[in-house]
Image (spheres, rainbow, N blue to C red):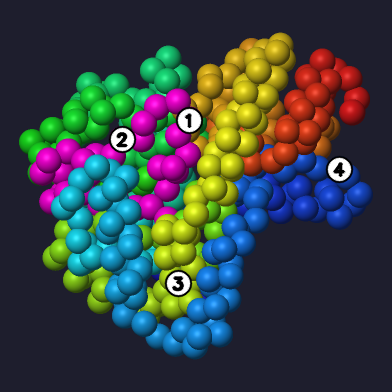
Amino acid sequence: MKYTERIRRLESEGAFAVLAKAKKLEAEGRSIIHMQIGEPDFDTPKNICEAGVKAIHDGHTHYCPSGGIPEAREVIAAEINKTRKIDTVKPENIVVWPGCKPAIFSAMMAIVDEGDEIIVPNPGYPTYRSLTKFLGAKAVPVQLLEEHDFRFRVEDLKALITPKTKMMIINSPENPTGGVLTMEDLEAIYALAKKHDLWILADEIYSRLVYDAEFRSVLSIPGAAERTVVVDGMSKTYAMTGWRLGYSVVPKKMAEYLFTFAINNFSSTATFAQYAMIEAITGPQDDVNMMLEEFRKRREVIVDGLNAIDGISCLKPEGAFYVFPNIKGTGLTSQQFVDKALDEAGVACLAGTSFGDFGEGYVRFSYANSIDNIKEALSRIKKVLAGQKV
């Protein structure tokens, strides 16, 4: 039987391949510390779970409007206006999705034609590149530079724009590096988008996970909303990865197209889950603040620990819960380091090349794990790199 060319263009994610290998080693009795998956290790806060259960008992288990229940869209619009310091977003600009990946995919489907070019951050979230290829478009990498705090230079971005460019994707805070774009960066990006009539897709899923600076959104720039798609969701901030809840902020006309896309794709996002989302956004934020502070403590431990290992240097990330250390001093390639860490130290992490060619010489650790486990992982890696057995 034959399959389409486009389905063969799709790429997987390195995190899931490493997870499978790590689980196999665990099944063989090995002790594995998981630092490869971008998932909070906290439980979903109790009040959110209770709201979801109540919604089920109240009978919210049927179809709902394709773009989300009206109450959820109203709450999200208010939250976006509050957190982005604007007053222009209306419920009709909001589309609710079963996760952020459908939000990204649908926006690209609505904007990008075969043969178009999309500028994507590199190293960057692999889904951007994979979906670009799936659509028959070309992913053009803009390099995120360690010496520039894992941000790209605007002049480099400008040099990549061609008549075929249709969209620029930005992710701030960024996966895998933890880098955060400045307001000056965002203003320059918008100026280029306006000059060349481009769309901006801003993946802001880590918007609440910023440590030392105020989160900035391109949506707050006057005029940017008409050519911007903002994607955010519940997975990272509220430890709700399994609930599959994301949303996009889009121009009204695009929202109408996306409603139809949703109808043809998955009908609607789970109704009861959206009531849990409402509680997450409007309810107490104590658990969110607690998680952020715990991530802050873990960040200090892992950055200091990595910098204490010969051959490794690590910048302190400004957001998200990843570090992206430079391992060139070990003499190993990214993949060799990852294999050695897992096979000999029992520590699962990801090669920088999982996020693009410019990730060579780096690896990603997720510090969504306990401080005790982080310290143990660092101790194991230090021993292995020194030629000792764990």
Q: CA distance from mark 1 to mark 4?
A: 32 Å
User: Label 1: which residue?
Assistant: 211
> Can see residue 262?
no
Q: CA distance from mark 2 to mark 1?
A: 13 Å
Magenta span covers which residues?
Answer: 205-233
Labels 4 and 2: the sequence-earlier one: 4
Which of labels 4 and 3 is toward the front? 3
Give the amino acid at mark 2: Arg
Labels 2 and 1: the sequence-earlier one: 1
Give the amino acid at mark 3: Tyr
Labels 3 and 1: the sequence-earlier one: 1
Image coordinates for residue 181, horizontal then vertical, percent? 34, 29
Q: CA distance from mark 3 to mark 1?
A: 29 Å
Marks 4/3 in contact by CB < 8 Å: the verdict is no
User: Label 3: which residue?
Assistant: 275
Image coordinates for residue 30, horizontal then vertical, percent? 88, 45
User: Around disc 4, counting alpha carbons within 10 Å, would you say few (fewer than 14), some (14 to 19), or many (20 or more)?
Assistant: some
Identity of the residue drawn at 58% across and 19% down: 314
User: Which residue is more in the foreground, 227 or 20?
Assistant: 227
Where is 302 relative to 131, above or below? Answer: above
Where is 228 relative to 324, above or below? Answer: below
User: Label 2: which residue?
Assistant: 216
In the image, is 226 to the left or to the right of 69?
A: left
Labels 3 and 2: the sequence-earlier one: 2
User: Label 4: which residue?
Assistant: 31
Label 3: element kind? helix
User: Which residue is more in the foreground, 173 or 141?
Assistant: 173
